[in-house]
Image (cartoon, helix red, strand yellow):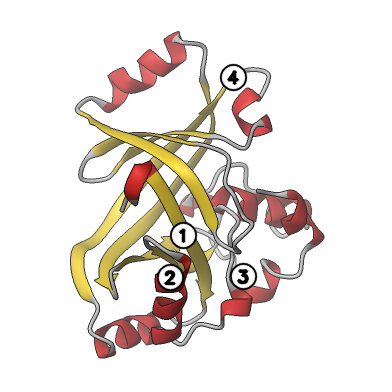
Amino acid sequence: MHTKNNREKEVKFFISDKQAILDRLSFVGAILIKQRVYENNLRFDTSDHSLRNQHQVLRLRKDDQIHLTFKDQPDLSAGIADRRELEITVNDFDTARSLLEALGYHVFMIYEKYRTTFTLNHCEVVLDEMPFGTFIEIEGETLNSIQATARLLNKDWDKRISASYLELFQILQNNKRTSAQNILFSEFPASSFSEKDFKNDPLIDSLV
């Protein structure tokens, strides 16, 4: 979902019980708009980490389509991640990767997940099954609509997460909760994380 002026405004919550959140989505009238789909994501950067140093994202994603996405540095002042997002659909994953590599970018991270997409209260709600845990992301036009949707889903606003999945993964790495180098299901064979692994960590304050 893209807001006006190519802005992405979102927040996420850790989910400890997948079935419970699916039941709640059904109870409050969320509409399923995209069935559960597998995603393969490649994150790109330059050799001197210029994108990461500026908290920017260059990503090639393949699910039932292929998307090339750029995200600018987020504004976290309102307690959500608010950033410019530019995205196009391409028709050849391998050629798009080769094009980016020819321009001097290289893949520094591979990550995968399963995503199910709903609409609720004029927001997009996605259920993301990551190798290190399950989350919902709520994306909307305004902070108020995102907060209202979180309330509908009985989510505690104080437990919201504005960090990206890569940043959460870095927290797990720094806390030595995982030795994985990529966010792949094959690298998390028996890992079990809880909400406390992603909250109240000093690294959150240094990550945007």
Q: Nearer the viewer, mark 4 or mark 2?
A: 2
Q: Nearer the viewer, mark 3 or mark 1?
A: 1
**Which amino acid does the dot numbered 4 rest on?**
Thr
Residue hosting label 3? 193
Q: CA distance from mark 1 to mark 4?
A: 27 Å
Q: Earlier in the sequence, mark 1 or mark 4?
A: 1
Pointer 3 with pointer 1, Cβ within 8 A: no
Q: CA distance from mark 3 to mark 1?
A: 22 Å
Q: Nearer the viewer, mark 3 or mark 2?
A: 2
User: At x 36% / y 42%, what residue is drawn?
Assistant: 6
Q: CA distance from mark 2 to mark 1?
A: 7 Å
**Which amino acid does the dot numbered 3 rest on?**
Phe
Mark carried by residue 10: 1
Mark carried by residue 169: none
Mark carried by residue 46: 4
Taking the image as shown, residue 41 lies to the left or right of residue 31, namely right
Pointer 1 with pointer 4, Cβ within 8 A: no
**Which amino acid does the dot numbered 2 rest on?**
Ile
Pointer 2 with pointer 1, Cβ within 8 A: yes
Element type at marker 4? loop
Question: Is 112 or 85 nearer to us in this picture?
Answer: 85
